[in-house]
Each structure stands twice: as structure tokens, then as C-alpha cells.
Image (cartoon, coloured by chain):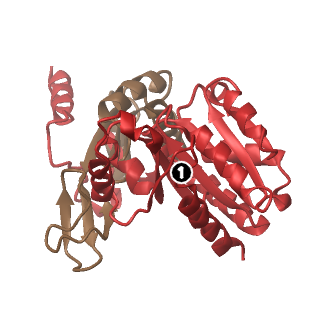
Chain colours: A brown, B red
Amino acid sequence: MHEMGIAMEIVEITIASIPAGMQGHRVERVNLKIGKLSAVVPESLRFCFEIVAKDTPLCDAELNIEEVPVVVRCRDCNSQETINEPVFACRKCSSGSVEVISGQELDITSIEIADEDEADADKTIEKSTI
Amino acid sequence: MLIKLLKNQQYNHHKTFQKPFHSHTRNDADRGNIKAGTSKIKVIRKVLDVNDAIAQQNRELFAKKGVFVINVMSSPGSGKTATLEKTLSYLMPEIKCAVIVGDICTSNDADRLAVSGAPVVQVNTDAFGGDCHLAAHVIKTAVNNFELEDVDLLIVENLGNLVCPAEFDMGEDLRLVVLSVTEGEDKPVKYPLMFRVCDATLLNKIDLLPHLDYDRQAAVKYIRQVHSDMPIFEISAKTEAGFGPWIDWLKQKINLKLK
């Protein structure tokens, strides 16, 4: 429901992360990690992102979303497992005292930025070998 | 012709079905991760880190001023406001309370809570784009309306919504979810994040149980399934049934921080 706000944050963080030497270049992809327990629906996020990315360097960017499964660790027997249903209990010893160790992520891991114009791509490669 | 072909290759190369994710890093170490066409820049930032940072500032402020903060969440119509009205009447004047109420529109809830004598600030999120939750920056601004030195307990009544508020830290000490027996027993497993992040459940409107086919045991089972050691207080904001244990527990939590 708050995907619009999340999408705006993504655009803001991405723009702030573009290195000084690459200002004005197009962002082609934003790589994200989203936990399955987080209250974010990837499809809604993509939809909102398309709207807020307009007229920014991210206008053509793709959101590459890696969904992170929910993993819990048992505080009693220390075993670790992925859960696919909302049953937060240890399958080995049935203890309910478990800690969620992943599945709540909402992280930007990296961004991919175009090396200026595609027509200049060859020149860029030449430059970078110098 | 050749250029066109290369472009096509690049295009195909970025289709989403290509898994696992790979980068275009060249072998030449000097070039780092520069690849033909794009450069990959490591970021590693939490999308909500701005909110989390403000929440941390709020937390430090509350610690300094000696204020215990609770964030009360639920679906619309679960009886949050009625529960808080009664809770305030039990706590005041022994514990000095202040309230922040979030709603998209109207000050109806704030008007009801102000009757208790506690200072109340209404936050209407339509000014924030009709947000479905209260975020840390909203709390940071709202607390300027209080003399925090004179407040022991700050109650934040969040917007009626079992999804979004669970995601946003505001700097609170305790999170509560109010679930009413008119809502269906399986809410905890439908909204696991909410019941996972909360520290206690208030199962409200138990005075209605004789009129409903509500399976109380099933509700408790579902809550335990998501959060096994979460305290559950069965209450009625109308008759005040069950308020004794709930108020005792809350006072104990407040005293733990403030003494």
C-alpha cells in the first residue's frame, strides 16, 4: 500500500548514488533485495516506480527484484530453516522461540549506469584502456 | 548493420529471465567493474534508512526526556480509540500521558481522546499524500507540540491498517496490535509481519463473544503460530473486562524504562 513512497525513496537513493563523473547518465537497472515478509508487493512497486521514475535518469531503468525467503533460526536447538507459510516455529524441535534472520529486507544492492551515449561506447572503452 | 546487431545482443542480454544475476565485469583489474555499455555501482542501502535514522533520533530524544512510547496499530474499526480512551482513564493522572493520533482525515479520534485531559496532537496524513501509516519524521515534528519533560507515556495511535505501519520504525519502545473478535480469527496469519513485529496483542470486543461464532482458541493459536511468546490480553473496551492485567503489564513496562 505504501509502494509509492518506497518507489520515491528508491529513485532518490539511486540518484544520490550516481558517482560524480557519471552525472546525467541513464540508470539502466536497480538491483533490489526484498524479503518475502516485508509488506511490499513487487508488482505494485514496479508500477509505482515507472510513474515516479519519469523525467529522471531512471526513466528507462528496470527494477531487478530478488525476493529473499524467510529464514528463521531456533533459539533452542539452533537449527535454521526456510519457512514458506506463516508458521514461525522450529520444525525440528517445535519450539516457537525463533528469530527471523532474513526475509524482512528492503535493500538496494547496486545500480547499473549507462556509459554515456551508446554511440560513444567504443570511445569510452578506448578511454578506459588508457 | 553490425551496430544494430550489437544493440540487439545487449537488449537480449538484459532480459529478466536470465538468472542467476551476473555482472559484466572484465578480467582487466584496472577497469574494475566497468562493462561495455554500463557500469555497476555497489550501493547497499536500506530503502527505509532515512526513516530508520530519524527513528533513532526520536529514540534518543525519548530516552533523554524520559518518555516511554507505544505504537498502537490495528485494522480500521478494531476499537483502538475506545481502548485508548479507557486505558488513559486508568493511567491518568498517575502516569502523565500524551497522544499522537494518525488519520487520513478528520480529528474525530483526537477529540475523543482529548476528553481524558491528556494533550493530543492529530496528524492528518492527507497533507503527506494520504499516507497509510505514520513515519518517523511525522512523529519528530508532532512531538514539538508537547513539553516532553512533562510526559511519561506517549501513545501513538497509528492509522487503521495491518500492512504498512508494521514496516516503519518511529522510535517507539513497544508495539501493540489491537485485534477485535469481529474480524475473523485468521488475521494474524494473513498479516504475519504485523503480528511478528508487535510486542503484545489486545484481543478486543470480547463482550460480543456470546453473539458471535468466534473461535477464540483458533485466534490465539494463529497468534501463537506467528509469535509464540507474545502476551495476549483479552479485553473489552466497552465493559472494561480484562483491563486489570493489561494495565498492570503496561505499567510494568513503563516503570522498567523510567525508573
Classify residue B145 by image quadrant: top right
Q: How many marks?
A: 1
Closest to the observer, B134 or A9: B134
**Farthest residue, direction bottom:** A77
Left-right relation of B256 to A27? right
Q: Is residue A21 visible?
A: no
Left-right relation of B230 to B165? left
Residue at the location (61% across, 55% down)?
B70
In the rendered image, the vertical position of residue B251 relative to residue A112, given as above or below: below
| Residue A115 x, y percent position in the rendering | 38, 38
Estimate how packed mark 1 is, as few (under 14), some (14 to 19) or many (20 or more) residues with alpha carbons within 10 Å: some
In the rendered image, the vertical position of residue B186 relative to residue A71, given as above or below: above
Residue at the location (19% across, 35% down)?
B16
Amino acid type indicated by mark 1: Ala
Residue indicated by mark 1: B241
| Residue B219 x, y percent position in the rendering | 31, 48
| Residue A88 x, y percent position in the rendering | 26, 60
Residue at the location (41% across, 48% down)?
B194
The quadrant of the rendering that contains the N terminus of chain A is top left
Indicate the chain on which mark 1 is placed.
Answer: B
Closest to the observer, B64 or B252: B252
Left-right relation of B253 to B119? left
In the rendered image, the vertical position of residue A51 relative to residue B148, given as above or below: above
Closest to the observer, B59 or A8: B59
In the rendered image, the vertical position of residue B118 relative to residue A7, given as above or below: below
